[in-house]
Image (cartoon, grey):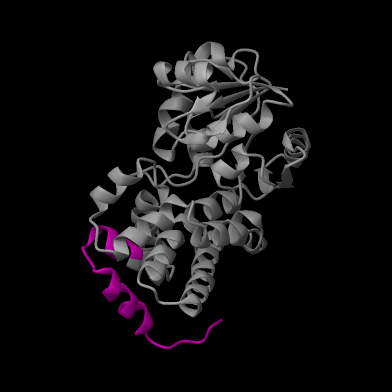
Amino acid sequence: MKLSVLGAGAWGTALAASWAPHHTVTLWGRNAAELDAMRTTRVNARYLADCRLPDALHFNPDLGSAVEAADLIVLAVPSGGLRPTLAALATRANLPPLIWVSKGFEPGSRKLPHQLVAELLPTHTQTGVLSGPSFAQEVAQGYPTALTLACHDTALAQHLAESLSGQRLRIYAHDDVIGVELGGALKNVMAIAAGICDGLQLGHNARAALITRGLAEMTRLGVKLGGHFETFMGLSGLGDLILTTTGDLSRNRQVGLRLARGLPLDAILRELGHVAEGVTTAREVAALADELGVDMPVAHTVYQVLFDGMPAAHAVDTLLNREIKAEF
């Protein structure tokens, strides 16, 4: 296949590198100088400095020519950059199938990626989402990884899952676009909470409880918005949640670890130098849960630590001293 990956951050670069040995892959990014450096050095120095990029990988700073003749477009821009990228694609006729790997809500509108696609590309139905437990660095280095690809068109999901799978990248087909999107978005908020828990050295028991109750919150909101319960027990739900709450390569977990040390949020984000989608997602999720009447105490507490100045240690006390309820 001819693949165009739009977004030269860590995840877009990692996927492009994984697919380049088996497909004709072009990586597009907004920064032409960075793309030129990647072409010369075969390294994404900003996001994946330890991973050599395949010689077969192509780079193109021009969006129009990057997607020309593509069999599949993969959107790997941050959630905040989806709208302008989709608007640029909307000016082109006869777009090929399109999938996105962006995780989170559009800031302000609280729209999920599939809603933005429906708004900006209303006649384009060959679309889907790819998500699951995956650190970009491990995918770029060829570590075994399993993901979920969901499309409303089940035949398309099966075709793309088979075409994009490789020896070290296994992709399962699914039809629950909303559930897969929400799993990828909500787990980032829970990863911040887990980072706070571990940063305060509260122990393995506390982290296990937090992950379990976090999954319950994710599932409640996901089902309320139309996702399937089973999806949240799968790779794009529980699988991704376990990875990002326990693995130190998780940017969102790193945010929580630093919050536990008392560092201010703006300093944390400058230090990371990467997008931590859970920060903006926490704001949108807290508002959405209130609007829909969904009980999400962990997400709300993360929001209060991030934006209301609640000390991390006080957040733990707030959760532990809530009214005792039945588990189910």
Horizontal and vertical percent position of residue 245? 50, 61
Residue 89 higher or lower than 270, as above or below:
above
Tell which of 98 and 63 is nearer to you: 63
Residue at x 41%, y 69% (from the top left corner):
198
Residue 92 is situated, as x and y percent measured from the top left of the image, at: 54, 15
Magenta residue span: 302-328
Name above or below for residue 22 compared with residue 322: above
Q: Does residue 133 lie above or below 61 as drawn?
A: below
Residue 292 screen position, x and y as percent = 42, 63
Judge whether residue 55 is colored magenta. no
Q: Residue at x 73, y 42 (%)?
A: 168
Splitting the image into 4 quarters, where does residue 322 fall?
bottom left
Query: Measuring 55% from the left and 39% from the top, which residue is drawn there?
Result: 101
**How many marks do you count on the picture?**
0
Q: Nearer the viewer, residue 152 or 73?
A: 73
Residue 91 seen by the camera? yes
Residue 293 in the image: above or below residue 325: above
Residue at position x 53%, y 38% from top? 11
The image position of residue 63, as x and y in percent, is: 49, 16
Residue 227 appears in the figure: no
Does 309 lie within the magenta span?
yes
Q: Nearer the viewer, residue 268 or 282?
A: 268
Quarter of the image for the N terminus: give it: top right
Quadrant of the frame with the C terminus = bottom right
